[in-house]
Image: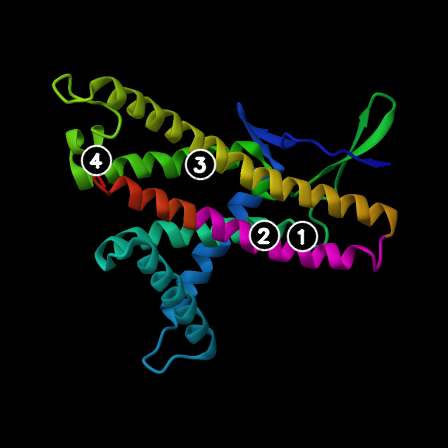
Amino acid sequence: MEVDISIAAEHLFHIGSFFITNSFLVGVMVSAMLVGLFLLVVKKKTIVPSRSQSLVEVMIEGALHTIEDVMQDKNQARRAFPLIFTIFVFVLLSNWIGLLPGVGTIGLIHDAEGHKTLIPFLRSTSADLNFTLGLSLSVMIVVQFVGIVSLGLWGYGKKFLVSPFQKPYIIGTFVGLLEIVSEVAKIVSFTFRLFGNVFAGEVLLTTMLHLIPYFLPLPFLALEVLAGLIQATVFAMLATVFMKMAMTEAQH
């Protein structure tokens, strides 16, 4: 039996015309895990914090200070923090859940062209191009919205459009077009950076597990744990930088 390595997420079942994929199932699990975890922390919070509460507070304070250092504005950082921190934790857990035993190796047997392949029940959401594209689009839409709210429609639009009475008009128009291309490139970069690194890591681990299934994959597993953390951090930090850039006037 072979393990089918597919770029697209595999369909498990459908509800009406809506197909449930293995990556979507993991996304729902991670979301429920995060909601349950933070509800538990909030419910059990005390004036004298327990060890688990202290750990959560240290994580939140460290993330907030990092965002403040990037944005150089406490008010902006506090407004952006819920979104940025949620993205970081969700992407981090999505990256790491693909490294758990059974993820990608337990599933349904499928006959394809005369040989049997395995369709796994679970697959990391970050290894699904649809998820990384959807997340990237969502972040960039929020970035545009934040820029418009902070600078006003015309104030933000001056990054892309130049008044005919402004000199030099031709150069300004060319720079504006480059800014539009840059915004599109950010979506592409966001999407393929996260997807490519996580998907390549899972393919590497799957290959190592089939070659030598015991001790050889351990160093690669440790490397992927670190890579998952780095990718989540990079994604969150870039979202913070883009948000700050959107709130900065064009001449600056």
Q: Secondary structure at mark 3?
A: helix
> Is there CB contact under 8 Å for labels 3 and 4?
no
Q: Pinpoint residue 215: horizontal percent, then vertical percent.
A: 83, 60
Q: Are discs 2 and 1 less than 8 Å apart at CB?
A: yes
Region of the chain picked out in magenta, as a range: 213-236
| Tag 1: amino acid | Leu
Q: Amino acid at mark 2?
A: Gly
What residue is pinned by disc 4? 148
Does the magenta segment cover residue 215?
yes
**Of 105 and 151, which appears nearest the observer?**
151
| Residue 159 place in picture, x, y as percent | 25, 30
Q: Is residue 252 magenta?
A: no
The residue positioned 36% from the left and 47% from the top of the image is: 241
The quadrant of the image that shows the N terminus is top right
Disc on res. 136: 3
Closer to us: 174 or 41: 174
